[in-house]
Image (spheres, rainbow, N blue to C red):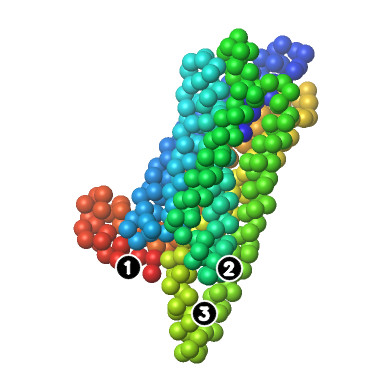
Amino acid sequence: MASLMYNNSSISLTSKEFQNEIKLYLANLNYTLSFVQIFIVLFGVFGNILALVVINRKSLRNTSPSVFITYLAIFDSCVLLLHGANLARSGRNPFIHCSLIYLTDLATFCANWILVIITLERCVAASSPFLAKRFCTVDSARRSIYIFLTISIIFFSIKFPFIYDIKQASKTKKCLIRSYFVLILRICQVILFYAIPDLLLLSNLFTIYALCRRTRQFSSACLKDEQKLDMRISDINSSCKQRQLTIMLVTVSLSFYLFTTPAMIVFIREYHPVKHHDINKIKQNIFFSQMSVILLQLNDATNFIFFCFTGQRFRQATGIIHEGRSGKGGGSASKLDRREWR
């Protein structure tokens, strides 16, 4: 969606003073929001690095959720860094501009769909321990990620020369989309980047139901020794560690709606903006348009916060890492590796 978010709407007004005031407002707003975006980039990258460190500790390294969270954090960081590169881009090389937009779209698409893959994998793991043993393994997680990344890179690389007009861009010193692809690209990006993931993420409701049902089964099985033994055997695959990870991932995927839904609505409205001659309403529309970019960046920057909010052991592991870096942790880190997530 970066291919359109950095080419914000041009307003055709008859009065030159009116246009100059709008341009001045847009320049001042972009300048102010650039500091907000820089903070989001730095905070988000730092949080994603912490998530990588915590989730790849010895006790979690060989679980399928750790594989997905690792790649999710990597692509979230890539999206944020590419947004930062777009802000810092001082040159007028159109090929570099188009390349940054291409990479931003690719990283955003991968981050969103990795979240979908995580959700579907956790849905299978929560609903059927038997299927989880076969499909929710580290090897299957890596295989699905590699296949998905290969297809995504090929698809985005093929469409690059068809979508962007490099020759025309060399004259305007700005990356341009071919005119007959603008509407198609806008519709396809909304559908592929957000609408379809929104629908697939609804499987979280079934995951929550499966977790609640499993908790009730465990409580009732504790009354009978024979059932209790069976439940303990099945819980080898669906332990508290897996349950905590599932809850964390469900929360993160539900937070996807919090940031992307308002941004998607604004993005769709931008194609046919309501034209006013009231300058305050025009400024308001511009402000909401720019805020949609902020919301999309927050979607990639706040996963670590939701991990800490919903994962008690994740918070403990983060605290242990902080103590270890400051020299106060001592042997507590190794102790946590032995007992965390149990």
Give left or right: position of 99 versus 52. Answer: right
Real-space CA distance between mark 2 and mark 3, rounded to the nearest whole angstrom: 14 Å
Q: Residue at x 50, y 64 (%)?
A: 134
Please, is residue 161 above or below residue 301 in the view? above
Q: Position of residue 308 (x, y in %)?
A: 44, 56
Q: Residues within 10 Å of mark 3 (few under 14, many from 20)?
A: some
Please say if the residues under marks 3 and 1 sit with CB atoms less than 8 Å apart.
no
Q: Amino acid at mark 2?
A: Ser
Q: Is residue 244 left or right of residue 284?
A: left
Q: Secondary structure at mark 1?
A: helix
Task: Estimate the x, y position of residue 13 in percent, counting from the top left.
Answer: 76, 17
- What kind of residue is marked 3? Phe
For residue 167, say whether it is visible. Answer: yes
Q: Which image quadrant for residue 336?
A: bottom left
Count of labels shown? 3
Q: Amino acid at mark 1?
A: Arg
* Circle 1 or circle 2, nearest the eye: 2
**Residue at image mark 2:** 127
Q: Nearer the viewer, residue 273 or 59?
A: 59
Front in this rendered view, residue 16 or 10 = 10
Q: Which residue was labeled with disc 3?
A: 218
**Quadrant location of the N terminus in the rendered image:** top right
- What is the crowding at mark 2: few (fewer than 14 residues within 10 Å), some, or many (at least 20)? some
Q: Secondary structure at mark 3?
A: helix
Q: Which residue is mark 1?
A: 339
Compared with residue 297, is residue 157 higher up or lower down, i.e. above or below? above
